[in-house]
Amino acid sequence: MAAGYAIFLASYIVFAIGKFPGLKVDRTGAAIIGAVGIVAFRIVPPREAVQFIDFGTIVLLFSMMLIVGNLQLVGFFEWTAEVVLRRMRPGHLLPAVIFTCGFLSAFFVNDIVCLVMVPFVLSITRRMKVAPLPYLLAVATASNIGSVATITGNPQNMLIGSFSGIKYRDFLEHLAPVALMGLLIDWAVLHWLHMRAAAPQLVDAEVIPLPALDASRLTKPAIVVTAVLVGFFMGVPPAQMAALGAAVLLITRTIDPHKLYEQVDWGLLVFFVGLFVIVGGAENAGIVQGLLDFAHHWNLQHVAVFTVVTAILSNIVSNVPAVMLLKSLVPGFADPHTAWLVLAMASTLAGNLTITGSVANIIVVETAKPEVEIGFRDYFRVGLPITVATLIIGWAWLAWVK
């Protein structure tokens, strides 16, 4: 038990601050070390360790990375972003960025959307001769908000979808309205804080050709992605449907598979595996039971209380570790269906509070360098009102529709 508590606390300290003090151990490394320690100290016997790993989540995450990676290699995201942003009038650039990022993030992993959108937003703002900061903030915040809509929007939703058994369409019906209202709030806040005095003027945009898109390379991915989304809506298990789609896309004569493998975030997959084992060790060591007692004492079953606790914990240790920790509480709630949805909503929307609140935010900040420096205050100034407002909307909606 002592070893279990020590490993659990040390791992979650690294998840919270990003690295172990004095060492170059990141979150993925901490997950690996923690999982090995859990097994080495016999907190979880080696044969039982595999049982704690939810392979449905790993398969879904891996398969979606392959599908989204394929779309990225054929230029789908770049072409879509350019078409949407170029065809909008200058005054409509902010809502165009927000709703494009939000829509794409709803069906594809939001981290990839951010990675692709930042260079195009920088290019468009240069041609319009406007400050890129509000539009970059729009990419980060809108991708987080949009990803709340579906199981495939972000890694924590995939995790929740696997454990909860909630169907893709059911998840969408409950949380898509939250995403839509959140995107409207995002637009209102960013416009109020940054755009009231802005008057963007497009400069020579009409003479710059759209990026080339090889339709022959896009046809197969488009058909496969459409089939996968239809399968999701028809109730096929997401992991199974995504795996089928990824397998079909790997049968190719045009794309080097090694380039496709490079699109996979192997560190994130390993992080998930290690985290599963660490949380399994926490269950064996009695830590989870202590959390259950805490939940009962503080009435975490109440939607508002659970929303606040999830949001706070997600900003302390990051959203995926927070979900892994809180998932053990939900089955014991009086209404686990609503609790799962609240966990997805709050852990995702809480990511907009600070730069380090989600991986998507960090991707935007790092990709924009050195052209644009986004400071903590720059982000927090918009992140705080957006996070508070969207969490209130999400809480009120789920409390009403349950």
Image: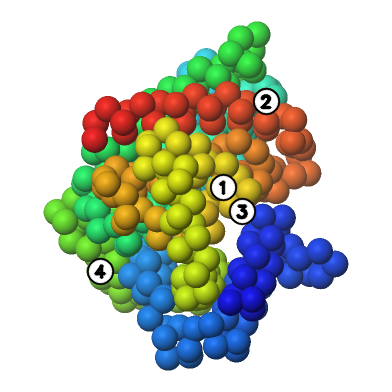
Type of amino acid at the residue the image marks with label 2: Arg
Cα–Cα gap, marks 4 and 2:
41 Å
Whether 257 is drawn above or below 125: the answer is below
Name above or below for residue 31 compared with residue 402. Answer: below
Which residue does the numbered mark 4 point to in the structure image? 240
> Mark 2 against mark 3, which lies toward the viewer?
3
Residue appearing at x 63%, y 16% in the figure: 193
Give the alpha-carbon distance from disc 1 to disc 2, as whole Å.
21 Å
- Residue found at x 49% / y 24%: 389
Residue type of the residue flagged with mark 3: Val
User: Gap in Å between the C-alphas at discs 4 and 3?
Assistant: 30 Å
User: In the drawing, what numbered circle is on residue 317?
Assistant: 3
| Mark 4 to mark 1 CA distance (whole Å) | 31 Å
Please name the residue that numbered disc 1 is placed on: 313
Q: Can you tell which of label 1 and label 2 is closer to the viewer?
A: 1
Q: At x 74% / y 30%, what residue is drawn?
A: 377
Q: Earlier in the sequence, mark 2 or mark 3?
A: 3
Q: Residues within 10 Å of mark 1 (few under 14, many from 20)?
A: many
Q: Mark 2 or mark 4, which is nearer the start of the sequence?
A: 4
Dot 1 or dot 2: first in sequence order is: 1
- Residues under numbered marks 4 and 2 in contact, where contact means CB atoms less than 8 Å apart: no
Q: Amino acid at mark 4?
A: Gln
Figure quadrant of the C terminus: top left
Task: Return the residue nearer the eye: 395 or 154.
Answer: 395
